[in-house]
Image (cartoon, helix red, strand yellow):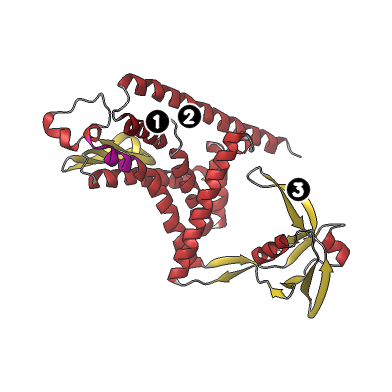
Amino acid sequence: MPIFWTIIILGLLIFVHEWGHFLMARWCGVGVRTFSLGFGPKLVGKCIGRTEYVISAVPLGGYVKLVGESPQEYISEEERYIAFTYQPLWKRTLIVLAGPLFNVLFALVVFISLFAISGKPLLLPKIGNVQPESPAAIAGVQKGDLILAIDNKPVTTWDELAKAIRKHKGTFLTLLLQRNNEKLRITLRPKIEKIKTLLGDEIERPIIGIVAAGEVKIEHLSPWGACWEGLKQTWFTTKLTILTIKNLILGKLSFKMLAGPIGIIQLTTKQAQAGLAALFSFAALISINLGIINLLPIPVLDGGHLFFYGIEAIRRRPLSVKTMEITQRVGIAILVLLMLIVMYNDILRIVKQTTLP
């Protein structure tokens, strides 16, 4: 059932997004006509106060319909005080911003929970492979060696090892290795190479030509430690998402790397097979991506509304209904174009997979 987990994860993330809009609207005193779990035809519904809570047929997310959400909607005099359109700018901004914010908060909760339950995995500084004719190979480093220290400074993780090597830009360094039951000291000089990062930037970096063995140890964390690691992971993922979008726009990264519906189904299925921890970690990543993408200044997205609110704050009056309608059409056209691109990418990946020997 490959599509099952995709529906569950995407449905949950979209629901979290809409729940953010819903809670902020209620907090700001804006009326909510409908809060639906799912899309399409209504299966069951119950009115509580002014709001109808609905379960709909298509379980892929949900939606919130606010009183006076559209400027063209007729609003009676008695409903104006709860109508979205008639709210001050700061309230409308908070309501729109709450959706993406809840996606990021969801990811934060997931990361903290994973660190609290499963601990923090640390990649050990054990060598899985040595590249031929590299500084490490020439110096006598071998597969299976465990690096204990660099220049008499202990290293316990691969990350610490990588940071220590980066400090030696072309200068000699001494490795303390453990090979079987023997400890060895080996001196070598890193080679400076130009490499391309995952974000498409070209940088110079010292390398010694070793690959990690992939062995990990688990560091169990206190509740405060789990919170701190969750915050760091959320910040890192958010920053990485923003930089990726920036480099896509600047042309440093190719749009071929983007995945569409088929690609997301494949990735979600793969993570589900790896276990619940991997699946929820992937869900947190997608949630942050969903939140950040929604903040792009494209009409029909939350970021487009926020952009218009910024213009309204400067002009001290909202844009005309006609201007809003035109920009909405442009926004829809942009989203359709992006959808076509990612679906084309999915088709190309499938063709390559089926034609490979």
Residue 335's label in the rendered image is 2
Residue type at tag 2: Leu
Please identify the quarter of the rendering in which residue 28 is found.
top left
In magenta, the rendered stretch is 87-96
Labels 3 & 1 near each other (Cβ < 8 A): no
In this view, the residue in front, 280 or 304, is 304
**Which is closer to the viewer, label 3 or label 1?**
3
User: Mark 1 touching mark 2, by CB under 8 A?
Assistant: yes
Can residue 37 be seen here? The reply is no
Q: Is residue 160 left or right of residue 230?
A: right
Q: CA distance from mark 3 to mark 1?
A: 41 Å
Among numbered discs 1 and 2, the one appearing first in the sequence = 1
Task: State which mark lies toward you, 2 or 3.
Answer: 3
| Circle 2: element type | helix
Residue 121 screen position, x and y as percent: 58, 65
Compute the Cα span from label 1 to label 2: 9 Å
Kind of residue at disc 1? Val
Per the picture, the main secondary structure of the magenta-coloured stretch is helix
Please state the total of marks drawn on the protein image. 3
Q: Quadrant of residue 320?
A: top left
Name the residue tied to disc 3: 194
